[in-house]
Image (cartoon, grey):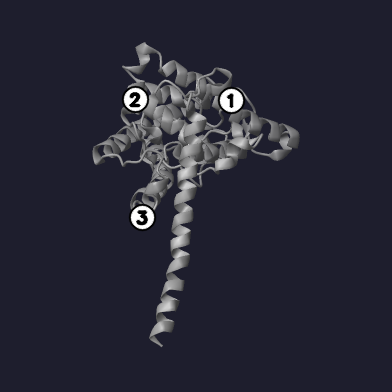
Amino acid sequence: MKTGGVGIIWELPLILVADKHINMSHLLPDDISLYRRWLFNVLMLGGRYLIFAGTLYLIYYVIKRKDWFYAKIQQKYPERKQILTEVKYSVLSFFVFATVLVLMRMASMYGILTSQVYHKFSDHSVAYFTGTTIFIIFFHDTYFYWAHRLMHHPLLYERVHKVHHLSKDPTPWASFAFHPIEAVLEIGFVPILIFTIPLHISSLFFLSMWQISFNVMGHLGYEIFPRKMMQNPVFKWMNTSTNHNMHHKFVKCNYGLYFNIWDILMNTNHAKYYATFDEVTARRDAGQKTVSESQDFVPELELETTGANS
């Protein structure tokens, strides 16, 4: 988590690794060494990062770099040095995350803590499954907001969180670019959930997909939500790429992850957030309209030319 630092990356196979009660024969032998288990975690984390962040970076920053520049939130592109730094610290975070997951596995193996993850839907009601799935999303959003505020304390910002803010105009590669200490804090919500609340494995998988989607989106550098979103009574509470991009640019504002609820309640939204969102989406929509009109115009021009020559 994210993480600005927009979130933490974790997923179904990694939760399975952390739970001694699940048959891992299809992924890893149960007696595999802790080092190999740690390495497997790193590869899984890195692989998902490569798929989600890499795909969007390829589309927005390589293939459509020139064509979609009009839609970029900050009208510039980051230097290569920044991108390499984002990747370096993200990989370092994966080392930390993998270590925590192995420690969770050990705690479960030696009976220090007991995983509450369940696998049969019949163990709990549909209402319980639905309620806990929604709850963990809001729990993580709340956890992230206050952990993020903590990281902006003067004693922690300069020593720890500033690493994430080396990216003033982040790319998807910045999604997990954390100082190792912050990486521990980012993943801290995982053992809290796993060892305290009965959760179906699919609920955790859903949270995993929800988290990585919002994390990469927050660091995309492009706004993907519609301009009228802020007029919708439900969707206006969702967070946007513009919101988190402004956090990286201005630092002391916009601390949320999935939702804008805590920023609204605590009055920590940037004063020009809504105006900036409107400006960015208006520019994007105008650019799309111009491109569409130019594409429609070319065939007509060619048709007239062909008719004249005949």
Quadrant of the drawing holding the N terminus: top left
Crowding around mark 1 (Cα neighbors within 10 Å: few <14, some 14 to 19, many 20+) is many
Q: x, y percentage for residue 80?
A: 25, 41
Three-letter amino acid code of the residue under disc 3: Ile
* Residue 220 quadrant: top left
Mark 1, residue position: 261
- Between residue 229 and residue 158, name the one nearer to us: 229
- For label 2, the SS is loop
- For label 1, the SS is helix
Q: Earlier in the sequence, mark 2 or mark 1?
A: 2
Mark 2, residue position: 179
Side of 27 where 237 appears, left or right: right
* Residue 298 quadrant: bottom left
- Between residue 93 and residue 275, name the one nearer to us: 275
Mark 3, residue position: 63
Crowding around mark 2 (Cα neighbors within 10 Å: few <14, some 14 to 19, many 20+) is some
At a point 24% along the width and 37% down the height, the residue shown is 81
Q: Earlier in the sequence, mark 3 or mark 2?
A: 3
Q: x, y percentage for residue 139?
A: 59, 25
- Between residue 18 and residue 6, name the one nearer to us: 6
Crowding around mark 3 (Cα neighbors within 10 Å: few <14, some 14 to 19, many 20+) is few
Q: Earlier in the sequence, mark 3 or mark 1?
A: 3
Quadrant of the drawing holding the C terminus: bottom left
Q: Residue furthest left?
A: 81
Q: x, y percentage for residue 200?
A: 64, 35
Distance from Cα at disc 2 to Cα at disc 1:
26 Å
- For label 3, the SS is helix
* Residue 111 quadrant: top right
Distance from Cα at disc 3 to Cα at disc 2:
31 Å
